[in-house]
Image (cartoon, rainbow, N blue to C red):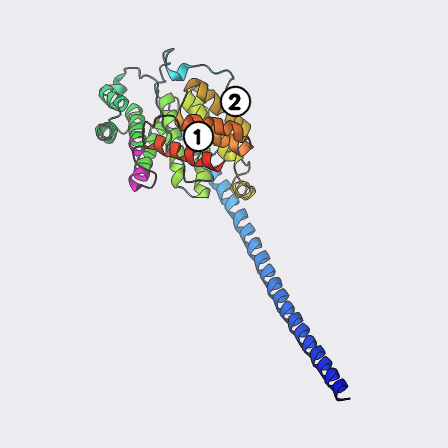
Amino acid sequence: MNTYNTVLGASTAFLATAVVIQSGALYFLYRKLKALRIKCEQTTSTCNALQDDVNGLKQRVKHLEEQQAPQKQRNTVTFPSFIPPSSGDPASTSMSRVASLTSSSDFQDAYDDWPDDGTAPLINLEGDWKSNGSVETTGLKHADELHEKGEHQKCYDELKKRAEAEPTNPEVLWRFARACHSLANTFDQKNPKRKELVQEGHKFAVAAYKITDKDFNVLKWAAVLSGALTDYLGTKDKIKEGFTFKEYLDKGLAISPGEYSLLHMRGRFSYNVANLSWLERKAAAAFFATPPTATFDEAITDFAEVEKLKPDWVENLIFLAKSYIAKGDKEKAKAVLNRTIKLQPEDEADREFIEEAKKTLKSL
C-alpha cells in the first residue's frame, strides 16, 4: 500500500510538474507571439511611412526636373568642334560592331557607380585626340609632353595655374581634369589625397562641359571623372551622378564609336547595372521612373572589343574576368586572370588590380 501511494504520489507530482512546465511554455510562446505581432505592426507602420517618404521624394524630384529643364537648354553653349584624329590614333580605330547608343533621357549610372566592392582603382587612360593648334591650345604643348612622360605632379602644377587664369578655356580645363586624374592614380585608394584630386578634377571637367558638349576630349574626361567620383558618393548620389555619366558617354561614343576607353566605361556601366541586387533596383526605381537595364553579356562584348583595340590593359582584363565570373563561366575567368597576373604594372592602379587578380584566382 505504501508503495502504491508512493508511486501514485510520484505520478501525481510528475503530472503536476508537466502541467506547470507546459503552462509555462505556452505562456512563453504567447508572450513571444505577442511581441512578434507588435513588431510586425511596427514594421508595417515603418514601411508605410517609408513608402510615403519615397512617394514624396519622387514628387520633389519630378518638380525639380520640371523647374530645371528650361535652364539646361540655356546653359548649353557650343564651342569650336574637335579635329578628327589621325588614322593611327586609338580614337579612330574602327570596331566590328556599331555602338548602340541610348538617349540621354534613359536611366544612366556610373561605373562604379553602384555597388562598390572597394577594389576599383581609377581608370587609367591615354590616347586623347590631337588639338587643333588654335588660340585656345596655345602654350599647352609642354603640359601635354609632361603628361606623356608621366611627370604628373609637374603637369598638375603647371595646368592648375592655367586653369585658374583661364576658367573659360575648355582646352585648359579638360587637360587639368586629366592631370588631376593621372596624379590621383599615383595614390592608393585609401589615401585622402586621391579623393581630393578626383573631386578637383571633376569640378574642372564639369566646367569644361558647360562651355562645350561637342569636344571629344571634354566629353571623355568628364565621363572619366564622373565615374571616378562615384567611388566617394552614397547610393542615391551615385544614381544621380550616373545620369550625367551616361550622358557624357553617349555623346562621346556618338563622336567616336570605336574609342576604347569609352567602350571600357560602357562595359563597366553594363557590368555594374547587371550586378545590381533586387533591393538596389527597387531603390533606383523609387527615385527614377526607368530603372537600369544591362546584361553581363553586353559587358563582356565591350570588354572583349577593348582587348582587341588595346591588348593587355590590366584594368579591362580584370573586369572581363569579373563579368565571366558573374555569368558563371569560371574557366574563361581563370584564363583571363592567369594572363593578367603575368603583366607588369605601370602604376599603383595596375598593382592593385594585379593583386586583386591573384586573390580572385585563389578563390575560384
Q: Is residue 84 left or right of residue 136?
A: right
Relative to the observer, which residue lies in front, 77 or 131? Answer: 131
**Which residue is outermost to the top?**
87
Where is residue 324 drawn, in percent x and y? 52, 30
Q: Is residue 79 left or right of residue 163?
A: right
Determine crowd level at label 2: few under 14, some 14-19, many 20+ residues with C-alpha closer than 10 A.
Answer: few
Read off the residue under disc 1.
318
Where is residue 358 drawn, in percent x and y? 42, 34
Q: Secondary structure at mark 2?
A: loop
Q: Is residue 44 left or right of residue 225?
A: right
Question: Can the viewer see residue 206?
Answer: no
Where is residue 20 drawn, in percent x and y? 67, 77
Residue type at mark 1 is Ile
Image quadrant in which you'd find residue 166: top left
Residue type at mark 2 is Ser
What quarter of the picture does the N terminus occupy? bottom right
The answer to which of marks 2 and 1 sits earlier in the sequence is 2
Magenta highlight on residue 186 = yes
Determine crowd level at label 1: few under 14, some 14-19, many 20+ residues with C-alpha closer than 10 A.
Answer: many
Q: Give the residue displayed 44% in from the left and 21% down from the top.
A: 307
The boundaries of the magenta stretch are: 183-196
- Using the image, determine if residue 43 lies above or below residue 295: below
Kindly identify which numbered label has been placed on residue 115. none
Q: Is residue 338 left or right of residue 329?
A: left
Q: Give the residue displayed 47% in from the left and 20% down from the top.
A: 305
- Using the image, determine if residue 128 lies above or below residue 200: above
Read off the residue under disc 2.
100
Magenta highlight on residue 54 = no
